[in-house]
Image (spheres, rainbow, N blue to C red):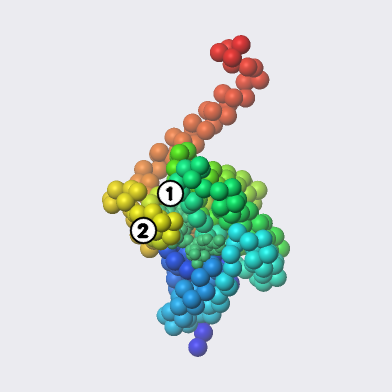
Amino acid sequence: MTNSNQKGLAIITGASSGIGAIYADRLAAQGHPLLIVARRKDRLQQLATQLKKRYTVNVETLSLDLANPSDLLTLETKLKSDPVDILVNNAGSGGLGPLSSTTADKTEALVRLNIIAVTRLSQAALDGFRDRGKGTLINLGSIIAFWPSAAAAVYSGTKSYVVNFTRSIAMEFEGTDIRIQVVMPGPVRTEFFSSQGMSDSVFPDDYYITADELVDAALSGLEQGEIVTNPTMAEPKVWEDMENTRTTYFAAVSSGKVAPRYL
Ligand SMILES: NC(=O)c1ccc[n+]([C@@H]2O[C@H](COP(=O)([O-])OP(=O)(O)OC[C@H]3O[C@@H](n4cnc5c(N)ncnc54)[C@H](OP(=O)(O)O)[C@@H]3O)[C@@H](O)[C@H]2O)c1
């Protein structure tokens, strides 16, 4: 039996745990058939079995390492050939710790996953959305995008990229039926820290929300037409102030003169 409200295909990367698995649940509940992607095949298959049973939608799995160029190409090709309705670029990793404690190869793999994969998959999805005149792209940023950190140089840098990249393409598609959103989680109780050999006690207990809370708030932000969704920011004025400061900064650095203190 298939769900009578069935909608277009949703692709979710990093769906084998945490936030991605909850996106898969919520989008299946809305009637979207799914393609869920991550490296751990067993976890993807378990989730697919549960979701098919719970929501009677088709759920396919694809075991890929998105930091690997040929695996990435497999998904890009699928995005170009299949009529995809929603892409959630959620797969991401932290590589937390000082730069001096990691290797250049591990750093490159992180950049490939957090930046190159997000960019290439967004571009492939948007090509299809443009042809069909509609579609939804959701990219996972992080509050660390605005918080340079000695323990997260590459992670912080990659998430700043995701924010600016996503906001810029949202400007490019403004006024169309293509929805583009960047979601800005703070600490979320997932395998994010443990998968990197770290403890969740990096942050105090009460800083965390659950992946369910995060995704439900993010989907509410999407429905409200937000481009940037800050699920844990109670007071929207904080964001407005940041935006105003950004505008002030841009005006200040566009003076066309070297600042007197450098002369
Ligand atoms: N949790 C937080 O506090 C937090 C805060 C801010 C932002 N975020 C962002 O939220 C997103 C989801 O993270 P999460 O908290 O749900 O963490 P998680 O539970 O560790 O999930 C990460 C997902 O990404 C997948 N993944 C990792 N490396 C991959 C690779 N090379 N190729 C394909 N898939 C890969 C993992 O699956 P496999 O291991 O099976 O490949 C997993 O499904 C990430 O982009 C993260 O940066 C999380």
Q: Viewer-nearest of labels 2 and 1? A: 2
Q: Position of residue 173 (x, y in %)?
A: 64, 51
Residue visible at 68% across and 64% down in the picture: 70
Tell me the residue that label 2 is attached to: 189
Q: Position of residue 82 (x, y in %)?
A: 67, 71
Quadrant for residue 113, please give it: bottom right
> Mark 1 and mark 2 in contact (Cβ < 8 Å)?
no
Within 10 Å of the Cα at label 1, are there few (<14), some (14-19), or many (20+) other Cα atoms?
many
- Judge by depth and name the residue closer to the eye, 101 or 71: 101
Task: State which tag comes first along the sequence, 2 or 1.
Answer: 2
Compute the Cα span from label 2 to label 1: 16 Å
Tell me the residue that label 1 is attached to: 230
- Judge by depth and name the residue closer to the eye, 159 or 241: 159
Mark 1 residue type = Asn
Q: Position of residue 96 (x, y in %)?
A: 46, 49
Residue visible at 45% across and 39% down in the picture: 150
Q: Is residue 166 visible?
A: no
Quadrant for residue 151, please give it: top left
Number of labels in the image equals 2
Mark 2 residue type = Arg
Mark 2 lies within 8 Å of ligand 1 (Cβ measured): yes
Kind of element beneath mark 1: loop
Q: Is residue 13 visible?
A: yes
Kind of element beneath mark 2: strand
